[in-house]
Amino acid sequence: MVVGNIDPGQRRRPSRQIELNDGTILPILYEDRSVIAIDKPAGWMLVPYNWDRTSRNLHLALSSSILARDYWARSRNLKYLRHVHRLDGDTSGVLLLARSPGALQTFGRMFESRRMQKHYLAVTSGIPKETDWICRSKIGPDPKRIGRMKIDPRNGKDAETRFRVVEARNHTALVEVEPVTGRTHQIRLHLAAHGTPVAGDSLYGRADEQGSDSRSGSPLGLRAVALDYFDPFQKRTVRIRAPAGKFCASFGFALPRRFAT
């Protein structure tokens, strides 16, 4: 089993971070011959290379840095790096990147077949009525607003998320989240449907929070903190953790002990 950080076979790597051309630092949480896991900052979008509606296109930034043969890429002889799964633009935390098309295909199938165990921490606006619950509301696109999803019992796709309240105070709660499926905006929608949307959510939050996001000084209260899987190439379990102490403290909560890195 590999826990956190750098694979023992990779300890001679000269850098444990990626520095983009604009100076953004992406900490490397784990790497081996197939993948690199980074701590994605909030505000970076995972969109196609040629999508030019934002200057915060992480795919484009990584590809450009590799093509420029920047040190972090050159020292690894990297020619390819693609995200295996997605995080919302304003969601931070563990993001798995594949170092080859073959790895992308293999790990992509693992996400699709639900062989990846993902954990998030969410801060809610309002305190949930239950301390443990599972939401299985189906999710589909909202035809009235591009880029927005909705609960759609009739035509939506199956979705399942497990929730557990860790701590509650001052009309907010720190919630541990385990998404079983990976629908777009799944965690945010399921919490909103429960009456306790993610704090700072500009799409599904409370009326007095509409329009707030990480760019306006109100960060989204959602962070991907853990990813566990059985590596089919190395035949061993990999556990990846992203630091979450600052995230929790920024909302007035203590870091749950089980997510301490």
Image (spheres, rainbow, N blue to C red):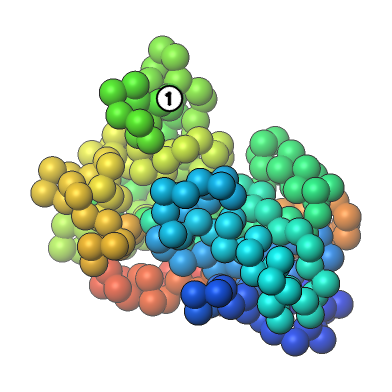
Question: Residue lying furthest left in this view?
Answer: 208
99 and 108: which one is in front?
A: 99
**Would residue 76 be found to the left or right of residue 50 on screen?**
right
Residue that badge 1 annotates: 140
Q: Which residue is located at x 83 percent, y 72 percent?
A: 77
Question: Residue lying furthest top in this view?
Answer: 154
Specify the quadrant of the image occupied by residue 222: bottom left
Q: Which residue is located at x 44 percent, y 59 percent?
A: 55
**Residue 102 in sight here:** yes
Q: Which residue is located at x 20 percent, y 50 percent?
A: 211
Residue 18 x, y percent position in the rendering: 62, 75
Which three-letter amino acid code belongs to the residue tagged 1? Gly
Label 1 Cα neighbours within 10 Å, binned few <14 / some 14-19 / many ≥20: many
166 and 217: which one is in front?
A: 217
Q: How many marks?
A: 1
Question: From the image, which quarter does the C terminus lie in?
Answer: bottom right
Q: Which residue is located at x 78 percent, y 43 percent?
A: 105
**Would residue 126 be found to the left or right of residue 260 on screen?**
left
Residue 63 x, y percent position in the rendering: 65, 61
